[in-house]
Amino acid sequence: MPRTVFGYEVLDFLGEGAGSVIYAVAHPQTRQIYALKHVRKRSEKDQRYLDQLDNEADAGRRFSHPSLRKIIAKHDDATLLRRAAEAALVMELIDGRTLEADCPSAHVPLVDCFIQVAEGLAAMHAAGFVHCDLKPANILLSADGRARIIDFGQACPAGTVKQRIQGTPDFMAPEQVRCEPTTFRTDVFNLGATMYWALTGRTLCTLYTLRKGPNSFLIDERTPAPHELDATVPVPLSRLVMECVRVDPLRRPRDMNELLRRLETVRYGMTRSAVAAITA
């Protein structure tokens, strides 16, 4: 572990990502503690990780919301004559664990998490950006139950047509596999797939290949809804999740604000049911 990275004192190793290492660091003057994502170009194929870091820095400066991790600064060793071979992204340090590592078993805190994530995505959408890689590993839950979305490396303006498949197979939308334009409904699918996993412990039944074409992404029409696998899952929540993961984007909730409203309605219904059960 290095002692410093771009002048920041390295305090601890936090984890590794695709092509990156994440440390807890202290600012050299203020001693403020941050998370720092460090990328080094060791071969030409590593250029994409530097590009993603640039993208994350650029996208992260365009929106601000309590459910979105704050981007503080970006540093690199580029010169007028040479592209960067090393870069670092300084970010808000969040004391928490990913939804993937520590998923709540109770439905109420799960729905609260989904609502906060939807709020964060709605803020990104209001700025014209799609996250494009929403999944359990990219949601951090702090001890107080606050959910924050992390990793904006795949984020792009709505309507972008990506030149290659990007995302996580178990959670990406069909249009991402087909390299079709990304829309706000792409994030609706990603969140729906994440909710499906959180409620059932299973990923969607999908056939994923790297072949582009009509059969690149198939969802089994017989995929059981969450309430069919676990009778304690509220039926309105289960049905909403299945709407979010429809293959045709036009058949999903039209935007994140609609999904947010419906999640809040589900949450209200769960509260009423709990009160009724207590007073019965």
Image: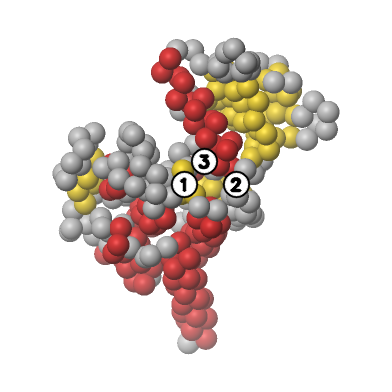
- Give percent across and percent down for residue 116: 55, 59
Q: Is residue 176 left or right of residue 91?
A: left
Mark positioned earlier in the residue sequence (1 or 2): 2
Q: Amino acid at mark 1?
A: Pro
Q: Amino acid at mark 2?
A: Arg
- The one nearer the camera, 213 or 17, is 213
Mark positioned earlier in the residue sequence (1 or 3): 3
Q: Check disc 2 and report the residue beneath it.
A: 62
Q: Check disc 3 and report the residue beneath it.
A: 152
Question: Which residue shows up at 30% across the image and 41% down it?
Answer: 179
For mark 3, does the 10 Å Cα neighbourhood hold few (<14), some (14 to 19), or many (20 or more) residues? many
- The one nearer the camera, 61 or 201, is 61
Which dot marks residue 184?
none
Question: Which residue shows up at 30% across the image and 58% down it?
Answer: 249
Mark positioned earlier in the residue sequence (3 or 2): 2
- Give percent across and percent down for residue 198: 41, 53
**Residue 162 in view in this figure:** yes
Q: Quadrant of residue 252?
A: bottom left
Image quarter of the N terminus? top right
**Residue 207 in view in this figure:** no
Q: Amino acid at mark 3?
A: Phe
* Alpha carbon separation for disc pair 3 and 2: 11 Å
Q: Check disc 1 and report the residue beneath it.
A: 157
**Comparing labels 3 and 2, the label whose residue is closer to the camera:** 2
List the single residue furthest toward the front: 80
Q: Is residue 225 left or right of residue 199?
A: left
Q: Quadrant of residue 245?
A: bottom left
* Alpha carbon separation for disc pair 1 and 2: 11 Å
* Alpha carbon separation for disc pair 1 and 3: 12 Å
- Secondary element at image label 3: loop
Question: Which residue shows up at 30% across the image and 62% down it?
Answer: 250
